[in-house]
Amino acid sequence: MINKDLKAYIENSIFKEYSKNEEAHGLNHIKFVIKRSLDLSKDKDLDINMIYTIAAYHDIGHHIDAKNHEVVSAKLMMEDKKLKEFFNEEELKIIKEAIEDHRASLKSEPRSIYGKIVSSADRETDVKETLKRAYLYTKKHYSDMTNKQVIENVYEHLKDKYGEKGYANFFLEDEKYEKYLKELRKLLNNKEEFIKYLKKIIEEIA
């Protein structure tokens, strides 16, 4: 059971910070990662409050520096003095490292099981949501691109990340993710179908 005072603090004081991020890294994404983190940590002898906190803070600095957001987010978490009411120094160090280690493009494995859980939970499990988030992120950060260029960028990015030789790691066994990855790779292997599907999603969110 998550500490009710910790949960209340994060919901009332931290969640609102995600309105500063673009939608792909907004509150809906954070709630998804929290739920997935808690699901992936079931049957493991881990501190549920630490799991919850790592997931809740992992993208909080995205609006400040998207390319280094894992470092910025960890720094903001460590500067939050309120968390000292709930965690000791060693626990805060593990939380910090797990936030720093969550990014898919990092070359090394997360330093703890907490980092592996939240890093894995940060991977989508819904193909449509993956394409939507990638499109919204690209539109926000590459506003000079034409829509055709954005679509091409989304395809190449997702292929680099989730293709057969993609860099996105998943550190736990999970049937839901395996099913998702198979579905996404099938779509990535047919660029024409990928573009058609993405255009349909763009029409829905326009």
Image (cartoon, grey):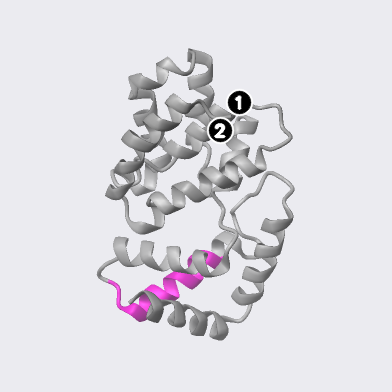
Residue bearing mark 1? 47
Q: Amino acid at mark 1?
A: Asp
Residue bearing mark 2? 51
Image coordinates of residue 149 in percent, x first then y, are 37, 76
Image coordinates of residue 96 in percent, x first then y, are 47, 28
Question: Which residue is rendered at x = 64% and y = 44% of the image?
Answer: 39
142 left or right of 53 in image? left
Mark 2 vs mark 1, CA separation in Å: 6 Å
Q: Amino acid at mark 2?
A: Ile
Quadrant (top left/top right/bottom left/bottom right) for the C terminus: bottom left
Residue 146 vs residue 14, the one in the foreground: 14
- Report if residue 34 lies within the magenta region: no
Residue 124, placed above or below residue 68: below
The answer to whether residue 129 of the structure is visible from this angle is yes
Question: Which residue is rendered at x = 39% and y = 49% of the image?
Answer: 27
148 left or right of 128 in image? left
Residue 109 vs residue 198, the one in the foreground: 198
Image coordinates of residue 34 in percent, x first then y, are 52, 43
Image coordinates of residue 119 in percent, x first then y, are 57, 43
Dot 1 falls on a residue whose secondary structure is loop
Question: Which residue is rendered at x = 37% and y = 61% of the image?
Answer: 137
In magenta, the rendered stretch is 145-159
Give the mark count. Answer: 2
Residue 70, placed above or below residue 148: above
Quadrant (top left/top right/bottom left/bottom right) for the N terminus: top right
- Report if residue 153 lies within the magenta region: yes
Q: Residues within 10 Å of mark 1 (few under 14, many from 20)?
A: few
Question: Which residue is rendered at x = 53% and y = 15% of the image?
Answer: 90
The answer to whether residue 108 of the structure is visible from this angle is no
100 left or right of 191 in image? left
